[in-house]
Image (cartoon, helix red, strand yellow):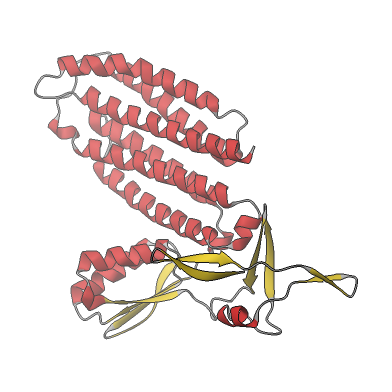
Amino acid sequence: MATNSETNGHSRVEPVERKVQLTGGSTYTVSLPKAWADQQQIEAGCPVNLYPAEDQLVVTRRERTVEENPHDTSIAADKYDTVALVSTIESMYTAGRDLIRIERIDETAKRRAVTKAVRQFVGLEIVSESERRLVAKSLLDVEKLTPEQTLEQLKRASQEVHREAIEAIVGSGGSNIHVCRHIETIDRLCALHSRRFQWSSADPSTMANGDQTSHMVSYLVAVQLKRIAEHAARIAALADRFERSPDQDVPVTLEAFDESARALLDRAVSGVLERAANPGSVLVDANSLLAEIAPQDGRCDRTRGDGGSSLGLALEVIAHTITRCIDIVTAELREQYRID
């Protein structure tokens, strides 16, 4: 229980201390000041939920159904240009909004862009539309979606982008078209993962079950996986501007580094999903691999000249993936130390 006070122009929540009393010899009760209860929309007979959360006790009003509290929001389309409007819808989706009303949508280009944007998000569908209005609703129950499912799919898609990028760089069949398709999949999965993270952050039962930190780590891992894919895609797009390396040892060297980097990514993500006992071993192997790559990368710098080297680009992709593996394991280690 708390009240609001002003400190330096900012509203601050002050706790209201209450005493637990024994009633009838078998029931504990806590009285609530009527004025405070009225502010919280609590009245006699109103059911509440109590959640234990470490050294805290979280009290909430009973859970509302989607029909009673759909977390809806409205957007006036005529206040935004097309890019900003699509970006706003994306932000609302990832923030956990269940119902998004787009009002005053008069331009055909905007309507087309909004319809396309809605289709990009998992579980979001246009449920009604009129001449000047579109209504999009999330039909996905995020509570039933586990972070493990999304992370596994993200890992596979990121590995595919990594592989396609390396092949495109060295000219062995990689396709930028395939890279772009994987990036679209990764964007959808990351938006879905962010939506679930936002939902879990606002759910008292998540805190009570001790899952909040795990959801945070999963979200950070998803961000790193997206960074791996985006970096690889950017480098692959530059591949045609650089010379193919004439070094006959390149395919063998590159293949070894590439396989090791993808194996590290498997171990790093698996450590998060399976709560590995010794994720620190990935750090040791990652740093050792970076040390092996450094001399090769330095040789590329000395030999590439003005035209550049495909080997140097490929090594940059591999080194970036390894560095992101280190970030993933670091996030997992921080969680373990926090819990322990």
In this figure, what is the number of numbered marks?
0
The image shows residue 325 at horizontal and vertical percentages of 43, 32
Whether residue 39 is situated above or below residue 279 in the rendered picture: below
Q: Nearer the viewer, residue 72 or 185?
A: 72
- Viewer-proximal residue among 167 and 70: 70
Tell me if residue 33 comes above or below residue 255 in the rendering.
below
Identify the residue at image location x=24%, y=36%: 236
Asked if residue 263 lies left or right of residue 258, the reply is: right
Relative to 16, 105 lies left or right: left
Query: Is any atom of residue 270 visible in this view?
Result: no
> Quadrant location of residue 294?
top left
Name the residue at the right extreme. 25
Query: Percent x, y for residue 158?
Result: 39, 41
Is residue 320 at least partly visible in the picture?
yes
Q: Quadrant of residue 223?
A: top left
- Residue 153's place in the image compared with 104, above or below, is above
**Extreme residue in the left direction:** 306
Quadrant containing the N terminus is bottom right
Q: Quadrant of the C terminus?
A: top right
Expressed as whole percent of the image width and height from the top left, the position of residue 301 reads 19, 18
| Residue 199 percent coordinates (x, y) | 51, 61
Q: Residue at x 34, y 31 (%)?
A: 320
Name the foreground residue: 17 vs 254. 17
